[in-house]
Image: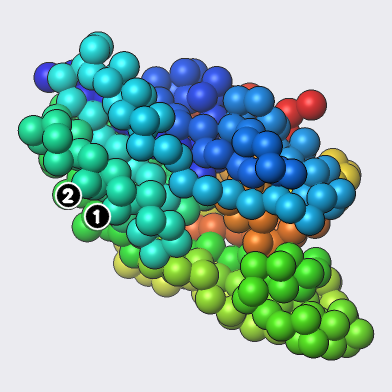
């Protein structure tokens, strides 16, 4: 039984990098000035953030059903079945749409809703790949991923409230007041839902608070005896700031195994440039994948 693992670029795994991993990834569509781009295909993450700064008309959308079906059909030409792992149903309707489409495949397509996005979603995709390599069927992989769905946490600190204002998550007055007071919101993504965690004055204090919350989550997960994955991400326009965030996270948490990658466009639309985040996830069974060239897999592009 040949079981394929399929995701979308919300996971941070783009098609080119997915080929290195043996994972299929569907590029997510982006709307910029009434033109459609596809994440990781004809626009890089760095290009996206440049557009985001310059153009107010930037948004993400779910993949067209024809694109999903075309990828599935292509994959099934070489595999007996596939596991499709899209972003959380709590953040997008694309998961439910995929579940409906999968009904036409007689069980050959298993759609996983494990309530994750981006860094934690990426961890689920890698777990799925390892489980498939261990001989698990698509249905078994779906069960395992959904069983561990809530075993992750993401924290994101914002440089500005402007992009939350664009998305209607804060009022114009609230954004203006936050700017005057230099308030930096700290968000958390748990169980596939984006919520406020804290409001902190100043970027340095926001980073400090993020590290404190992250430390608590890591301690909670390790106390449960879990093998964990820790990752940092950002949308810094300056590579030096990006590298500084990774160095700070690694030294503060006393870890030398921290994965670093840019914030994907689906999150970037809401948080804007110069945001910074961290995630911790329970790792099911993929220690053999720790030697993968992450610096190649997760790149900022031109």
Q: In which quarter of the image is residue 214?
A: bottom right
Q: Report how far apart the C-alphas of labels 1 and 2 lie in the structure.
A: 5 Å
Q: Is residue 73 visible?
A: yes
Q: Residue at x 24, y 12 (%)?
A: 77
Residue wearing tag 1: 146
Residue 136, position in %: x, y? 16, 33
Q: Residue 209 versus residue 116: which sits nearer the camera?
A: 116
For label 2, the crowd category at 10 Å Cα-Cα, with few meaning under 14, some 14 to 19 and many 20 or more, is some
For label 1, the crowd category at 10 Å Cα-Cα, with few meaning under 14, some 14 to 19 and many 20 or more, is some
What element does badge 1 sit on?
Answer: helix
Q: Quadrant of residue 51?
A: top right
Q: Which residue is drawn at 34% across and 64% down?
A: 150
Residue 261, position in %: x, y? 64, 42
From this view, report whether residue 200 is shown above or below residue 6.
below
Asked if marks 1 and 2 touch (Cβ < 8 Å), the reply is yes
Q: Residue at x 25, y 11 (%)?
A: 78
In the picture as drawn, the residue positioned furthest to the top comes out as 78
């Amino acid at each position: 039984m040949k079981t394929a693992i399929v995701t979308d670029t919300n996971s941070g795994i783009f098609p080119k990098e997915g080929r290195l991993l043996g994972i299929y990834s569907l590029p997510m569509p982006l709307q910029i000035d009434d033109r459609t781009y596809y994440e990781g295909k004809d626009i890089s993450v760095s290009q996206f953030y440049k557009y985001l700064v310059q153009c107010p008309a930037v948004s993400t959308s779910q993949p067209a059903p024809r694109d999903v079906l075309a990828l599935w059909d292509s994959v099934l030409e070489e595999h007996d079945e596939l596991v499709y792992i899209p972003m959380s149903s709590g953040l997008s309707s694309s998961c439910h749409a995929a579940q409906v489409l999968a009904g036409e495949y007689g069980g050959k397509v298993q759609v996983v809703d494990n309530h994750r996005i981006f860094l934690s979603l990426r961890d689920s995709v890698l777990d799925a790949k390892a489980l498939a390599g261990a001989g698990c069927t698509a249905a078994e992989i779906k069960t395992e991923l959904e069983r561990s769905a809530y075993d992750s946490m993401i924290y994101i600190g914002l440089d500005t409230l402007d992009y939350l204002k664009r998305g209607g998550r804060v009022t114009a007055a609230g954004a203006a007041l936050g700017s005057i007071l230099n308030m930096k919101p700290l968000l958390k993504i748990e169980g596939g839902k984006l919520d406020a965690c804290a409001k902190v004055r100043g970027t340095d204090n926001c980073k400090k608070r993020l590290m404190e919350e992250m430390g608590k989550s890591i301690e909670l997960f390790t106390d449960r005896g879990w093998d964990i994955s820790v990752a940092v991400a950002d949308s810094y326009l300056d590579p030096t700031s990006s590298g500084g965030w990774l160095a700070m996270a690694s030294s503060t948490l006393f870890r030398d195994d921290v994965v670093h990658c840019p914030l994907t466009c689906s999150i970037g639309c809401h948080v804007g440039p110069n945001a910074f985040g961290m995630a911790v996830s329970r790792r099911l069974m993929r220690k053999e994948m720790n030697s993968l060239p992450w610096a190649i897999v997760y790149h900022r592009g031109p």
